[in-house]
Amino acid sequence: MCVVGLISGLIDPDIGQYLLREEGEVVVDEVRHHWVAYVRASLEYLAGALLLLLVPFAHVDIAWLPMVLWLLLWSHATWLALGVHMDRFVITNMRVFRVKGVLDRQAATMPLSRILDITVSKPILGRLTGYGHFCFESAAQEQGLRDIRFVSRPNERDQAIQRVVQRSGLRGPRPN
């Protein structure tokens, strides 16, 4: 059971440990990256598989080379995929925060009161497949939450943030 917990902690960030439960903080939305963010890693896996197909045709003296290249490509692709998987953006009733990192974890947080503006950009591919990029503007310009890329369903996520900000009373009362 201990090994399972260790592996689970390595491949899935525990968002609950970052919550201020005593203060009543709850998760409104935990945002994982859109599948498009995994395309580069997938292409590297495919290139590695193609290298493996070369092994039977390689000269005996260099047959090890495609195997080594395959191992390097798949290791790098796994690292890229884990990096994307471990990067989470979380919206709570009190703040937004981001947790990322495979071996070393980094957490950046911003109280809802510090959010001045959210820019949502949707490139043409994003409009076709359903992702966008967030850019947060706050009083402190240098923070780990400035750019969040490959957010799935960006309009819904933007509206969720706006609803939380509105309900917290930070932007004034709702219009009638």
Image (tube, rainbow, N blue to C red):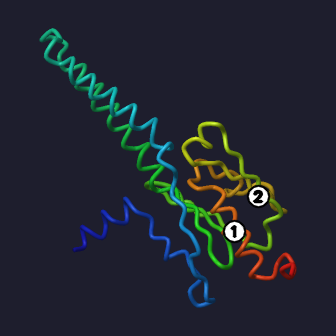
Which quadrant is home to the C terminus?
bottom right
Q: Residues within 10 Å of mark 2 (few under 14, many from 20)?
A: some
Residue 13 position by quadrant: bottom left
Nearer to the camera, 77 or 40: 40
Q: Is residue 6 above or below residue 121?
A: below
Residue identified by numbered label 2: 118
Nearer to the camera, 42 or 145: 42
Q: In the orientation shown, which residue stands out farthest toward the front?
A: 176
Residue 75 percent location from the top left of the image: 33, 38
Residue 39 position by quadrant: top left
Q: Is residue 2 above or below residue 107?
A: below
Q: How many marks?
A: 2
Q: Is residue 127 left or right of residue 53?
A: right
Residue 169 percent location from the top left of the image: 81, 82
Asked whether disc 1 touches disc 2, contact meaning CB atoms under 8 Å apart, the reply is yes
Which quadrant is home to the N terminus?
bottom left
Q: Looking at numbered disc 2 in the image, what kind of residue is underneath it?
A: Ile
Q: Looking at numbered disc 1 in the image, what kind of residue is underneath it?
A: Ile
Residue 166 percent location from the top left of the image: 77, 77
Nearer to the camera, 35 or 137: 35
Q: Residue placed at 48% from the left, 49% from the top?
A: 84
Q: Residue placed at 64% from the left, 52% from the top?
A: 148
Q: Is residue 107 left or right of residue 5?
A: right
Q: How far apart, in angstroms, are the residues tagged by discs 1 and 2? A: 9 Å
Residue identified by numbered label 1: 161
Q: Is residue 91 left or right of residue 112?
A: left
Nearer to the camera, 93 or 2: 93
Is disc 2 placed on a helix, strand or loop? strand
Q: Is residue 142 left or right of residue 29?
A: right
